[in-house]
């Protein structure tokens, strides 16, 4: 499963190099991840209310071409890796209508309780785990 | 009571006009407010744990001269108005060593419970109210 | 002329009160303003390239109900005031499908050169001024 | 050469997990990088005016323990790698007074012209390159 999320670069996201500041990509990844999860008929917010939190373990972001104010970007999102205790989302960003990615990256998350304790999602929420597993490209 | 908080403009806070983006001033006001409250020997975080929340009712921000990357700014903070149900903080921002303000504004906050219900701080936490009242320039 | 811009609250925009942090409204206003201007067939970015900058003189933001993660908001934007040297945009934010605004505010901008010198837009760019004037609710 | 930069977590940097949102670490890295460069007696801003830009090629950020509102953090910064065309800064973040890092990461940057064209810093600005080289832990 792959989802596509459209982002339009906001003025506030530019910096004095007249490009989108690099810290915004993590926010765009997050918005794309939110939409990816919404495709299952649930939401990130509902997962949190269920007691499943997804704090970040690692962020990786590789920048090719800059994005500029008012650029229309498309973030492609997929699950790159899934285990009972963690999940990795992979992202590719392109300018609308272009082939070549301008940015690629991933975010790796732990499944935790609201007290940030590790959780075995497969045991605790087998149905949710199954949903994610079906959507994943690679799992173990 | 007046406190002074130093802010150094971050690169991420600039925009493509090569000035600090206007939305950052609200964040700087907040940092200044945090330090103002810390002067009482308590912290904003502890107030929240006590059950006293201060969501915003109004933000006002008037911009004179721009601030730029690496500028050292000083935010002067005072309580402009205090009532049992709300508090207004007033802010004046200057470049370090300069007389003329580059920005002035205020934030008005309600006292609420964590469920965002209005709270009469004077009744509920009379000692805290007294502390704020002593620090205020004007109250009723 | 009134435009409507949809905003979906991002996770990164929440704070530890579990509501959208108040500083984001200025960013949403800006996105709404961008779309308002795009309705004229030009863009904010093109205006900047023409040499017309719109730095903020004043921001005012009044908060009613909080916005939360994944809330769908609609920002209604209009020109509240236009003079040869400045422009004020007025904003009203509602949750999608609701009547009652959760937030109202305005931003007042100067017309300046890229060196941030005041500009008489009516003299310098009479056609652009006319466009804005036609869209304004009140001008002098 | 290693520098230490103090960061106090801002309220606006928290999210609804009541921890500092992961996108802020890139901003803190940047502030630490700014101070690292300031130790040479020049500034990041002056480098940009000279015509040396440092856009990001890659950001990596590994999160251990969360940071919370008002936490005092120390960012340790060093040059991890230097070549004539690029530079990598390495960061370790600890809570003040603690041994164990809560976060580690790096940012890799290209040296470019203001038009974002690659630059050979060693040829173009040999003295600046030498300064960086002396401060680097590993270069080639």
Image: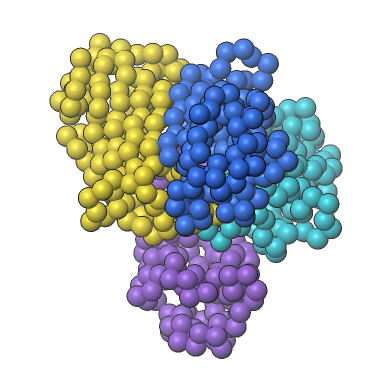
Chain colours: A cyan, B yellow, C blue, D purple
Q: On the image, which quarter does residue B105 sit in?
A: top left
Q: Residue at x 77, y 54 (%)?
A: A94
Residue A112 in the image: state x and y as whole percent: 59, 38
Q: On the image, which quarter does residue A110 sit in?
A: top right
Residue B120 in the image: state x and y as whole percent: 30, 12
Residue A117 in the image: state x and y as whole percent: 54, 39
Count of labels shown? Answer: 0
Q: Residue at x 44, y 30 (%)?
A: C60
Residue A39 in the image: state x and y as whole percent: 79, 33
Instruction: In this rendered view, identify the residue nearer to me: C124 or B115.
Output: C124
Q: Residue at x 29, y 33 (%)?
A: B90
Instruction: In this rendered view, identify the residue nearer to me: D114 or A39.
Output: D114
Residue C58 placement, left or right of D96: right
Instruction: In this rendered view, identify the residue nearer to me: A99 or A42.
Output: A99
Q: Residue at x 84, y 42 (%)?
A: A1
Residue B98 placement, left or right of C7: left
Task: For residue C81, say whether it is visible.
Answer: no
Instruction: In this rendered view, identify the residue nearer to me: D118 or B43.
Output: D118
Q: Is residue C71 above or below residue A123?
A: above
Q: Is residue D65 above or below residue B134?
A: below
Q: Is residue D91 above or below residue B49?
A: below
Task: For residue C42, say whether it is visible.
Answer: yes
């Amino acid at each position: 499963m792959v989802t596509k999320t459209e982002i339009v670069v906001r003025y506030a996201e530019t910096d004095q190099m007249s490009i989108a500041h690099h810290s915004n990509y993590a926010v765009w990844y997050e918005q794309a991840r939110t939409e990816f999860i919404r495709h299952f008929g649930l939401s990130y917010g509902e997962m949190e209310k269920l007691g499943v939190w997804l704090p970040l373990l690692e962020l990786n972001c590789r920048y090719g071409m800059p994005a500029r104010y008012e650029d229309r970007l498309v973030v492609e999102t997929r699950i790159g890796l899934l285990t009972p205790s963690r999940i990795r989302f992979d992202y590719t960003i392109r300018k609308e209508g272009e082939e070549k990615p301008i940015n690629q990256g991933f975010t790796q998350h732990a499944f935790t309780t609201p007290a940030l304790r590790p959780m075995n999602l497969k045991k605790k929420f087998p149905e949710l785990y199954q949903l994610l597993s079906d959507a994943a490209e690679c799992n173990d």
